[in-house]
Image (cartoon, grey):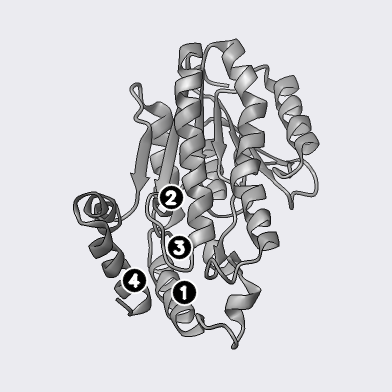
Amino acid sequence: MKDSSKVILVTGATSGFGKAAALYLAGLGHKVYGFGRSVESTTREAGGNLTMMRMDVNDSSSVNDAISAVLAAEGRIDVMLAAAGLGLGGSVEDVTIAEAKALFETNVFGAMRTVKAVAPVMRGQKSGLIIFVSSIGGLIGLPFQGLYSSTKFAVEGLAEAMSMELRPFGVDVVIAEPGDFATGFTANRVKAVASESADSDYKEAYRRAMRNIEKDENSGYKPDVFAIAISRIINSRRRKLRYMIGSPLQKSSVFIKKVLPSRLFERIMAWYYTGSR
């Protein structure tokens, strides 16, 4: 392994952002370990630089076993990219507590399990980088994406706190905030059962919002753009806490939210997604 290469762990590496980042980073010569629930057996890809292993981020034993296997093979962990995540569409009222818990289990507690497993290793090394994958939707609540946005708002808070907690040990924590990208995330998004029902009072606004959201995602950047941005973060000497990765319009929406009166911004967003004011 080259002196400049790093041992990089990527959760959610079987699809979307995680897969794109794992393949791209392995192609640059890094030693990458990609994790996913659907991985049946340990395999090597990308010229041997990418090792795919099974890990269920919802299972602490699975997480700890996978991290231990990497440490046994490599002796260190330089970067953790927490990219495992799910989507959920539906009104807050229609989403059941069970549906919400399942989403938080993966998006929040799954990320928490993985970073808790690598943090002691990085503290012991006095070096390391943890990258939480949040979303621009973790900065702006979107209609009929309320539960998804709330998980990403939670990730933002976790990352902010961990950044201050781990910095004295030489460990950096950053947040990657992608906008709309053309990945399998759109097709794999879970839909709240009640919102999908013809009996839902939200059905028209919900369907209109989901059409607009999916249209923006399907016409968004390819995930390679995200992977390149992650590589730049890894190579940066002075890292920021947050990196928005998306179109200029998507990035500007965060700035616009800060400067406009809250109710005006809310009306603009409601009109854009649902046609209502």
Amino acid type shown at disc 2: Gly
Residue 217 placement (x, y as % from top left):
42, 65
Left or right: where 237 falls relative to 15: left
Q: Nearer the viewer, mark 3 or mark 2?
A: 2
Which residue corresponds to mark 3?
182
Which residue corresponds to mark 2?
138
Per the rendering, the mark at residue 210 is 1
Q: Which quadrant holds residue 52?
A: top right
C-alpha separation, residue under disc 4 versus residue under disc 3: 23 Å
Crowdedness of circle 1 by 10 Å Cα count: few (<14), some, many (20+)? many
First of labels 3, 2 by sequence position = 2
Q: Are marks 3 and 1 in contact (CB under 8 Å)?
A: no
Amino acid type shown at disc 4: Ala
Crowdedness of circle 3 by 10 Å Cα count: few (<14), some, many (20+)? some
C-alpha separation, residue under disc 3 versus residue under disc 2: 18 Å
Crowdedness of circle 2 by 10 Å Cα count: few (<14), some, many (20+)? many
Secondary structure at numbered mark 1: helix
Amino acid type shown at disc 3: Ala
The vertical placement of 249 against 235, above or below, is below
Secondary structure at numbered mark 2: helix
First of labels 2, 1 by sequence position = 2
Q: Nearer the viewer, mark 3 or mark 1?
A: 1
Q: Nearer the viewer, mark 1 or mark 4?
A: 4
Q: Quadrant of the N terminus?
A: top right
Residue ID at (31%, 73%): 272
Residue 257 placement (x, y as % from top left):
26, 54
Which residue corresponds to mark 4?
270
Residue ID at (45%, 71%): 214
First of labels 2, 4 by sequence position = 2
